[in-house]
Image (cartoon, coloured by chain):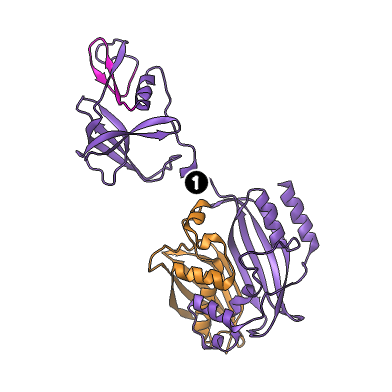
Amino acid sequence: MSRILEETDRLKALGWCGERVARDPVNQPMINNWVEAMGDTHPAYREGLAPPAMVQVWTMRGLHPAPQPDDPLHAMSAVLDEAGFTSVVATNCEQTYHRALKVGELLTVRSRLSDVVGPKKTSLGVGWFVTTESTWFSGEEPVATMLFRILKYQPRPQAAAASPITPVVSRDTAFFWEGTAAGQLRIQRCEACGRLRHPPGPMCPACGATSMGFVVSEGAGTVYSYVVHHHPPVPGKRLPFVVALVELPEGVRVLGEFLGESVEIGRPVRCTFVRVGGFHLPAWEAAA
Amino acid sequence: MRFEQSQVLPEQIFQVTRADLVRYAGASGDFNPIHWSERFATSVGLPGVIAHGMFTMALAGQAVAVWAGTGDAIVDFGVRFTRPVPVPDTDEGTDISFTAVVKAADADFATLELTAVCRGEKVLAQARAKVKQF
């Protein structure tokens, strides 16, 4: 951050940078291209008058701009890029046109850094507002000025790229996750009375015994209920997604993401396993 | 036309498609990939490919030129880009609607305050154009 402030002070102190000459003079083919993009059919633009809003276009630097260490916007952008504020959107533009431009005029532009404000929290992410002023000249005559403000921001990590939430493994659930890793859907069974239960726990709710084993489910069932999750965001998940509660013929219900297109209660599904952060999570897909 | 104080100017609607953005990128020399690459735009937190701010501003300028009846009436023009203008990859793209009210007018100049709306939301703020009276 101190580097950003230092560079701000240095560039502001430099004031107006040296002039940069437009690649081409104001010309009819570029005007034709621009008004075509705008869908603008004003007849004067066919006859050598340049649309005022094109003024910045004449001194744009093309697809592969050469480095310009003394250009304040370029220099400031480079420092902010280095600090991780790599993305850019325009936030303000004010232009003043002193007179209309005609085909044949060769423009030059001079710019200065007027302000750098940040770091600010914005809806796009944390960033810095960089304001520059530019004046265009035709020969010695100033023809237009512009105040231009951009936001250089650090893109927020995307939900889909964040680390996903993984299960917590306990003594009671270890057998279940060992099962999914082996491609088995294991259901806890009380060794004393034989009752099945899911999710697993330390003690049988029927007889109170604490000696637990398991059976391996066939992995086929029907959707008993489901929710479509739209909000809030879940790390590692793309929204919306469907969570289905599936009833197994063994007599228990098991939660898992439904991976198909259309979910409905009663739909036959079968179990599959999805690898997430070192785990194999049970999930459901429509049975053929 | 001669603008009069408090005059309300008729709405103008512009359709914007991906092809317009591609054309504008080339014509303006602004090749920021947020204006043509869905992959890049979403990776930096945008809702998708968005219109160039200067494109939206120039459309507003075009609306002003139509209201004024001449292409060289604008003297001063300023906007704040408050919301991005997402342009979906469809034949229709999106629409931007421009309206304006004449805030001040004298013998020489008029000041228009513009409203730009895309999908029900204002995409420009403090959009003011000072124009010569003819």
Observer-nearest of B18 and A113: B18
- Magenta part of the chain: A183-201
Q: Is residue B81 magenta?
A: no
Give x and y (percent) for residue A86.
61, 53
Disc 1 is attached to a residue of which chain? A
Q: Say what amino acid the circle numbered 1 marks.
A: Gln
Question: At numbered mark 1, what does the secondary structure look like: helix, strand or loop?
Answer: loop
Which of the 4 image quadrants contains residue A70? bottom right
Residue occupying image coordinates x 27% and y 11%: A191
Would you say A31 lies left or right of A163 here?
A: right
Q: Is residue B98 above or below residue B88?
A: below
Is there any visible trace of residue B1 in the rendered image?
A: no
Give x and y (percent) for residue A28.
59, 84
- Image colour assigned to chain B: orange
Q: Chain letter for purple?
A: A
Magenta stretch secondary structure, dominant: loop
Which of the 4 image quadrants contains residue B107? bottom right
Give x and y (percent) for residue A126.
59, 49
Would you say A10 lies left or right of A76 here?
A: right
Count the marks: how many?
1
Q: Is residue A190 magenta?
A: yes
Q: Name the residue under label 1.
A: A158
Observer-nearest of A136 and A232: A136
